[in-house]
Image (spheres, rainbow, N blue to C red):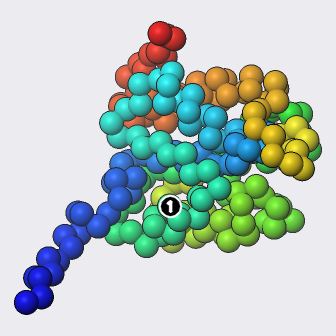
Amino acid sequence: MPEAVMPIREEDAVPDFCTKPVLILGVGNVFFGDDGFGCALVEHLETHFDVPAGVCILDAGTGVRLPLFTLCLSPVRPRRLLIVDAVDVGREPGEWFELNPADIPVVKLDDFSMHQLPTSNMLRELQQQTGVEVRVLACQTGPLPEEVCPGLSEPVQRAVPEAARWVEREYFNAAIGAATVRERLPA
């Protein structure tokens, strides 16, 4: 006799990262030097800060498209999305800055380091079609290795805690009503 199929309840079908008011996605390849900036920032936030309950932080690695597709299709979405990634736009290595998805130069769409052309377009669509506030925190890379070479360069490594404090001010404090969030001291 066939087993009864239980219907999937909507609340069970929506991933947790869709239900939080704030989603921070670290993007990059930790095996290619400074390209791992987004992943390193996520790790720093998770180990040095108390992440508020209303914030979901994910290390998306090179697979950022899956959570973005999920967000586009989900009936429930965060109000704010921050993508953290490494880019090469000719600035000083380790310089971090904010990019609006609408401001990503057309010439950068093919090589914007979010690991495939449709990603930049999905960010724009997510913002325009769903009302999710989408921001990109980018860090200028040094020369990227041609072969596997894990680890960030010194300038990009120095940028990680600085950028983490910016994320705290812009995202953590706002998520908990601007209450003070204290950086954890190393154990």
The local secondary structure at tag 1 comes to helix
Where residue 178 appears, as percent x and y from the top left, is: 40, 27
Residue nearest the viewer, comparing 140 with 60: 60
Residue farthest along the left direction in this orientation: 1
Viewer-proximal residue among 58 and 178:
58
Would you say residue 162 is visible in this rendering? Answer: yes
* Residue at 77% over, 32% down: 152
Q: Is residue 95 toward the left or the right of residue 45 in the image? A: right
Residue at numbered disc 1: 67
At x 78%, y 58%, the residue is: 112
28 left or right, relative to 22: right
| Residue drawn at the location 59% of the way across and 45% of the way down | 26
Above or below 31: residue 40: above
Establish if 129 lies above or below 21: below
Percent coordinates x, y for residue 120 in the rendering? 68, 64
Name the residue located 33 percent from the left edge and 36 percent from the top edge.
53
Q: Tell me where residue 96 appears, x and y as whole percent.
A: 75, 35
Snapshot quadrant of residue 4: bottom left
The amino acid sitting under disc 1 is Pro
The total of numbered circles placed on residues is 1
- Image-based side of 11 in relation to 129, left or right: left
Q: Is residue 139 visible?
A: no
Mark 1 Cα shell of 10 Å, populated few (<14), some (14-19), many (≥20): some
Q: Nearer the viewer, residue 164 or 154?
A: 154
Q: Is residue 153 left or right of residue 115?
A: right
Name the quadrant of the N terminus: bottom left
Percent x, y of residue 155: 82, 26
Please identify the residue farthest to the front as the structure is shown. 1
